[in-house]
Image: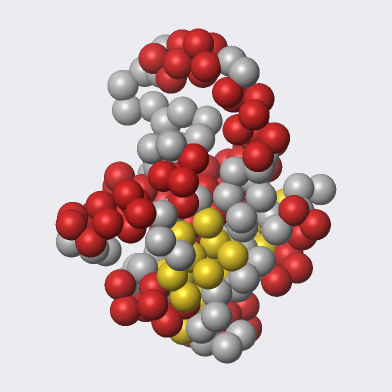
Amino acid sequence: DLMTVLNAAGPVAEIRLNRPAKKNAVTLELLADLVAACEALADEPGLRAVVLSGEGGDFSAGIDLSVLMSLAGDLEGVKAEMLSMEPGQPNRFQAPAKALMDLPVPVIAAIEGVCFGAGMQLALACDFRIAAPGAKLSIMEGKWGLIPDMGISLSLPRLMAPDRAKALIMTARVLSGEEALGEGLVTRVEENPHAAALVFAEELVARSPDA
């Protein structure tokens, strides 16, 4: 499976990207599975929090290069698909971030290892981000001549001043967890982000959901 959902019927569910051999680089199938998982969890009556992480010590290396190669071979088809979208309707690249944002409970990203490109945009779509001090984070699309357009135009302006956000997007600079905290991209830095995310989720569960 490209993705694992744990404890779906409990108060704290986990979504784990599951391509550890590829540093959890995302494919179109994985993105679609993530949307489906979020939509299914949204209907769970007892759900109170979600933790998003990656298997094998990395959050996500971003879009799998094989996906980029396939898209490059059909640029006209990709353009036509994007132009055919109804106003306000997310395309297949934006839908996962929107699905995370639309979950009616807090979503916590636990970030270890690399968190690049599409992975960074998924993390930014979460309500909270807990990163390891040595994690590596980057809005890396500029390295490939791409526009980061998987929800970052909504998420990043809420966290950073426009000039600082543009600098990160245009340079594709790689930040450590500590540097990302200084830039306001992550909520906290912890040696074990996954364990800290679960503890924080339980803390949220103990409070009124109406809040």
Query: How is the model colour-coded?
Result: secondary structure
- Residue 73's place in the image compared with 162, above or below, is above
Image location of residue 76, percent across then percent down:
50, 11
Q: Position of residue 83 (x, y in %)?
A: 39, 14
Q: Is residue 1 left or right of residue 112?
A: right
The answer to which of 41 and 129 lies nearer the viewer is 129
Residue farthest toward the bottom in the current orientation of the protein: 191
| Residue 59 seen in the current view | yes
Q: Quadrant of residue 24?
A: bottom right
Answer left or right for 195 relative to 209: right
Q: Quadrant of the C terminus?
A: bottom left
| Residue 75 screen position, x and y as percent | 52, 17
The location of residue 4, given as percent across then percent down, is 74, 56
Vertical arrangement, residue 21 with respect to residue 92, above or below: below
Q: Is residue 137 left or right of residue 59?
A: left
Residue in view at x 66 percent, y 25 percent: 70
Residue 193, quarter of picture: bottom right
Work out whether 26 lies above or below 104: above
Q: Residue at x 59, y 65 (%)?
A: 114
Figure label count: 0
Tell which of 65 and 158 is nearer to you. Answer: 65
Question: Residue drawn 58% across and 23% down?
Answer: 72
- What residue sits 23% from the left and 61% below the top? 164
Whether residue 148 sits left or right of residue 133 in the image: it is left
Kindly tell me whether residue 95 is visible in this rendering. no
Vertical relation: 1 (above or below) 109: above
